[in-house]
Amino acid sequence: MFFHLTELEHHPIHFDVNFAPGEIDLGEELAQKGSLHAAGTAELLPNTLGEIRLRGRVEASVEGICSLCLEAAGANVASPFDLFYRPAPRKTAHAEIHLEEGEIDLSFYTGDGVQLEEAIRDFVLLSLPMRLTCSEDCLGLCPHCGSNRNTAACSCRAEQVDDRWAALRNL
Ligand SMILES: [Zn+2]
Ligand SMILES: [Zn+2]
């Protein structure tokens, strides 16, 4: 869904869309579970900057890889968004863009408007934790033998302790 400037000049555009898995590219490491729902409004702000505001709400479930045990890890996004897009500055201007604090949701668009799918993708990816985990108390992989400590109790820890006592006994 593309929000074209020429249409936004006349009126805001409301959207209420369900995206099937694959319609929004979340990258190779994330799989979308079920449909992703995005609803809200796109409007051209009444300033001379050509600024487009996208606000609404997004709900999505994704599955990635647990950063600790490498098994599947799910995450949900259910969040309001309020995003601002300005026309990308022309490359010839050599102007450095200084974003004011609090303007973290400001992005730039090139061309004649903003693509909803791209905006939603960026927002969902930013909303997810940097490192997914399968559960809050994931035990991770054993650094010695590599087995998943959530499912198999290896004996590495016990052996280490034994080694330490053995070293003491030799003193
Ligand atoms: Zn895990
Ligand atoms: Zn082990």
Image: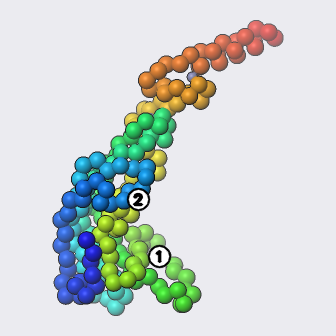
Q: Which residue is mark 2?
A: 126
Where disc 2 sits, the SS reads: helix
Q: Where's residue 36, x and y in %?
A: 25, 55
Coordinates of residue 145 in the picture (x, y in percent): 59, 25
Quadrant containing the C terminus is: top right
Asked if residue 82 can be seen in this view, the reply is: no
Q: Nearer the viewer, residue 129 or 111?
A: 111
* In this rendering, position of residue 159 left or right of residue 91: right
Left or right, 71 with reference to 40: right
**Compared with residue 49, is residue 40 higher up or lower down, i.e. above or below?**
above
In the orientation shown, which residue stands out farthest toward the front? 22
Q: Nearer the viewer, residue 84 or 93?
A: 93
Q: Quadrant of residue 56?
A: bottom left
Identify the residue at image location x=70%, y=16%: 164
Q: Nearer the viewer, mark 2 or mark 1?
A: 2
Residue hosting label 1? 100
Ligand 1 under 8 Å from disc 2 Cβ: no
